[in-house]
Image: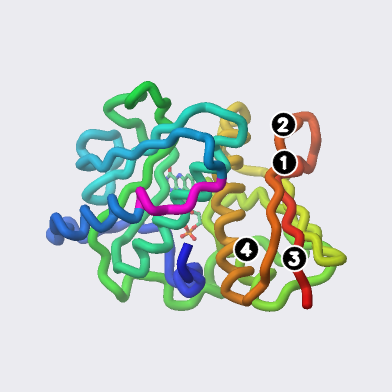
Amino acid sequence: MYDLYNMIFKRKSFRYFNDSLSLCIEELQNIEQHLNEAMPLLDDVKIKYRIVKREQTTCKRGEYCILVYSEKKENYLLNVGYILEQLDLWMASQNIGVCWYGMGKPDNLKYDELDYVIMLAFGKGQPEEFRKDYTKAKRKDIEVIWSGEHIQNVTNVVRFAPSACNSQPWRVIYKNGVIKIFRSAEVRTIIPKEKISFYNSIDMGIFLCSMEIALRHNQYEFKRIVHEGQKSDEEQIEVAQYTIYLE
Ligand SMILES: Cc1cc2nc3c(=O)[nH]c(=O)nc-3n(C[C@H](O)[C@H](O)[C@H](O)COP(=O)(O)O)c2cc1C
């Protein structure tokens, strides 16, 4: 995963695309190549992508959609969020506008025996349409999402990750070189109750991707553990843990 750190500040959800501009074949091939080269969180979960015209879905914006299909193994939603966020950020570097589109429905719910998970709508964006001042992006205060010591250029950066309905389910405790990452099961959002865990698990994968980009950019080496078996009756569900190697 090369350095996408600066894209955390530039990216935003594109809601308006210039429909008179089209992506060329080379750009589409490049996107496909990046999809195939993106680093997975989990090596043993099959995942495939289709890039289709937006009209093949119910999505109302963008020129194309990346449709993601995955095997439904443990933590597969974290894996989807983690991989696709790399694309979200990389596409910002190419001035391609992107919007995660959880509401959209694809033409096919199955592909090569894998199940449809989510789509990213994308299309040509004007450079000036990207985020200019990330501090103006609506996010929860640091105190809400992060407890313990702060990590300079990490704590205040990872919170700008995108999430379904901006629900920001991530909660972090950092002490003694260990970052513990939880998913709050108590987020207030308009997402229907039965779907919160689905979307917020993708969000957590996005957050892990942002965390690793921020840590690497700041030269922190770390070891990651992804927890298995999230218990849905807990208020704070343990998702992952990073042990930082401090000099
Ligand atoms: C998993 C996921 C699903 C999303 N689904 C939709 C959607 O269906 N429609 C939409 O307009 N935005 C959708 N979004 C975009 C979020 O609303 C957006 O990321 C959030 O409000 C933060 O704004 P930003 O991305 O501009 O920083 C989704 C985001 C994520 C991560």
Q: Disc 4 to disc 3, how far (Cα)? A: 19 Å
Q: Is mark 2 within 8 Å of ligand 1?
A: no
Which residue is at 31% across, 31% downward? Answer: 106
Instruction: Find numbered disc 1 in the image and state the secondary structure of the residue it sits on.
Output: loop
Magenta residues span 35-41
Q: Disc 4 to disc 2, how far (Cα)? A: 25 Å
Instruction: Find numbered disc 2 in the image and state the secondary structure of the residue it sits on.
Output: loop
Q: Is residue 25 above or below residue 119?
A: below
* Residue matched to label 2: 229
Q: Disc 2 to disc 3, how far (Cα)? A: 24 Å
* Residue matched to label 4: 159
Q: Who is closer to the viewer here, 37 or 190? A: 37
Q: Nearer the viewer, mark 4 or mark 2?
A: 2
Which is nearer the N-term, disc 1 or disc 4?
4
* Residue matched to label 1: 227
At which x and y percent is residue 104? 37, 36
**Left or right, residue 219 beside residue 14:** right
Which residue is at 66% across, 61% downward? Answer: 140
Q: Who is closer to the viewer here, 81 or 48? A: 48
**Left or right, residue 203 beside residue 246:** left
Labelled pair 4, 3 in contact (Cβ < 8 Å)? no
Q: Quadrant of residue 29?
A: bottom left
Q: Is mark 3 within 8 Å of ligand 1?
A: no
* Residue matched to label 3: 244
Q: Disc 1 to disc 4, how far (Cα)? A: 21 Å
